[in-house]
Image (cartoon, rainbow, N blue to C red):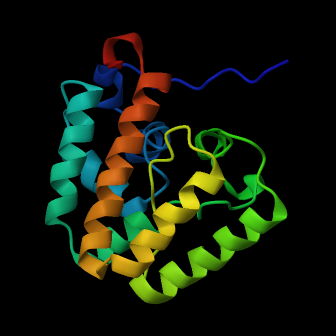
Amino acid sequence: MSTPTPTLPPIAVLNTLPLPEFASAIHLLFETSPRLDAALAAARPFTSYPALIDATADILTHLSDADRVDIVNAHPRIGAPKTTLSSLSATEQSHGPAPDATIHARLSELNKQYEDNIGFRFVVFVNGRGRGEIVPVMERCIEGGSREGELERGLREMIGIARDRLARVGPVEGRI
């Protein structure tokens, strides 16, 4: 028996939830980040889930560098063991053929290089690509990415992930 796909409450309900329940609901769109949870809760009410995601993109531009890094670091590492991923991240990272040990080792190596060089976790909207297809993307970002450019790219990717998740878990009134 398969586990039912979680869904978001109607936006009118989300707007009235206390912070813990609000945070739990939006974690279907965004990885767990207390800083982002608090900023979004303070920005209520939202007219729709797409408006909440748009507001998130705007809020991210006004946060401190440290807060933005914390939010990016809430994302799991590409290729992380499924036991450490949220259910949605596990689904997103499970596309394509099962990675072999070589790809898994390379992703682990690239995650370390990226974090050592750039200073935070690599975030990418996998969008159905297999792990092997992510390797050259990571390599390009390590070779040519600046810290600030990579932070901006990672946050944009996070917004893309949220939009994709909304299409899968949003209430009927919030699906895009």
- Number of numbered discs visible in the structure rendering: 0
Q: How far across and down, in percent of the image, does residue 23 sit?
A: 43, 45
Q: 49 or 118: nearer the eye?
A: 118
Q: Residue furthest bottom?
A: 116
State the residue at coordinates (45%, 48%).
125
Say which quadrant the C terminus sits in: top left
Q: Position of residue 151 (x, y in %)?
A: 31, 70
Side (left or right) of 2 relative to 141: right
Compared with residue 65, is residue 170 higher up or lower down, i.e. above or below? above
Please tell me which residue lies in front, 161 or 105. 105
Residue at image coords 72%, 63%: 103
Image side of residue 49 versus residue 126, left or right: left
Does residue 132 lie above or below 68 as drawn? above
Q: Is residue 76 visible?
A: no
**120 displayed left or right of 100:** left
Figure check: 90 above or below 137: above
- Location of residue 79 with respect to 65 vertically, above or below: above
Percent of width and height locating residue 45: 19, 33
Task: Say whether residue 84 is left or right of residue 139.
Answer: right
Q: Residue furthest top?
A: 172
Residue 88: give x, y in percent of width and height: 59, 39
Q: Residue at x 60, y 61 (%)?
A: 78
Q: Quadrant of the N terminus?
A: top right
Query: Which quarter of the picture shows residue 62?
Result: bottom left
